[in-house]
Amino acid sequence: MAATIHLSSTASSLFNNINLTSSNSISQKQLPFHSKPPPSKRSSTLTIAQLTSPPPLGNDYYNNSSLLYGIGRTVEGSDERTKTKIVCTIGPSTSSRDMIWKLADMGMNVARLNMSHGDHTSHQKTIDFVKQYNSQFQDRVISIMLDTKGPEVRSGDVPQPILLKEGQTFNFTNNRGVCTQDTVSVNYDDFVNDVEDGDVLLVDGGMMSLVVKSKTKDLVKCEVIDGGELKSRRHLNVRGKSATLPSITEKDWEDIKFGVDNQVDFYAVSFVKDARVACGSIWFIQYQIFIPYFQLQMGLVPHRSDQAMVARGDLGAELPIEEVPLLQEDIIRRCRRMQKPVIVATNMLESMIIHPTPTRAEVSDIAIAVRQGADAVMLSGETAHG
């Protein structure tokens, strides 16, 4: 727990010492990132397509001392200067009241709920703790972001990590609950139909890779290319392909309704393939949406969302990893041009899951993201289970 708090403090210190304000187009218009928007801005709804009527939150919403504008909120008139914001994923290491309050005190601006893990009961506790903090400390308000699971293909549960070695034969099966030293299940019934001989499977964002050798009606036989430890519920990608699943699943809609009922501030729609997904969500989601890109419809998707997320883990699994830095810069530049705030995510301070201080490369990575104009960076495993 101490390591997690030290991590949050380190992240906050890093952003302060870089001594740059958020350099998006909003700040270029002399509009402070946390200040009250002008009347024309305040009267527009915070949906994907920026509708022209206010959200159904009552008249007190815009008169409240905590104004939702951008990523994270502070009380109007406070002396906290504009700076790059910190999004922290709440997980087993940080789900208690004390830990959430400590993260907030150390610089957390947004608490992220990862709907790929946990259930509504555990996430409800997090929401309640954040709201308790907001009600007690009027000088600082923590926003809440709900990150949908999306159409993920994941491996099943394993009691202990399975060590995959180069050249080893390993199998994936549609049969649920299977777990042996050479075979695990997947959560997607059409997985066998979606892969072909020669396809490259990327596990856990590309940390491990396997090539498909053959398949039967319920089994995909692979050879390990790059090994590692296979843990429970690891994300699976087929390089160059996407699963034939809806971009917003039934579970996602249930989670979104849960968020709406709890007045969650932001929603992150995962694995968006094109702008039609954002358009299709317009009538249900009434707040700001962050779109993680992993397919290149960048000219359309930012226009259809309020904000964007550079999900580098997903990008690195879909594209050659050396293209990710250039793509990050391009996405940030496009978002700034369209006056859309943007988050940079994945592996920001990954080493601090174990170690008390970041690597020099991680410090440089954060500095580059800030200098490029990122409005926020997101911590995932660093705060969830670090």
Image: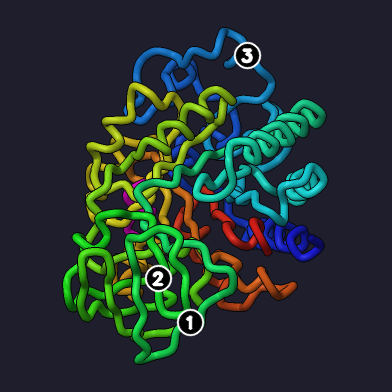
Q: Position of residue 362 (x, y in %)?
A: 57, 72
Q: How far apart are labels 2 and 3 at the CA level?
A: 48 Å
Q: Pointer 3: what residue?
A: 63
Residue 203's tag is 2
Regarding mark 2 in the picture, which secondary structure is present there?
strand
Queried whether the magenta region covers residue 334, the answer comes back as: yes
Above or below residue 276? Residue 234 is below
Residue type beneath disc 1:
Gly
Residue drawn at 45 percent across, 14 percent down: 54
In the displayed structure, does residue 385 sit left or right of residue 71?
right
Magenta residues span: 330-335
- The earlier-in-sequence mark between 1 and 2 is 2
Q: Quadrant of the C terminus?
A: bottom right
* Residue at the (61%, 42%) spot, across then down: 110
> Badge 1 is on which residue?
228
Label 1 environment density (alpha carbons within 10 Å; few <14, some 14–19, many ≥20): some
Residue 202: give its label: none
**Of label 2 and label 3, which has the lower sequence position?**
3
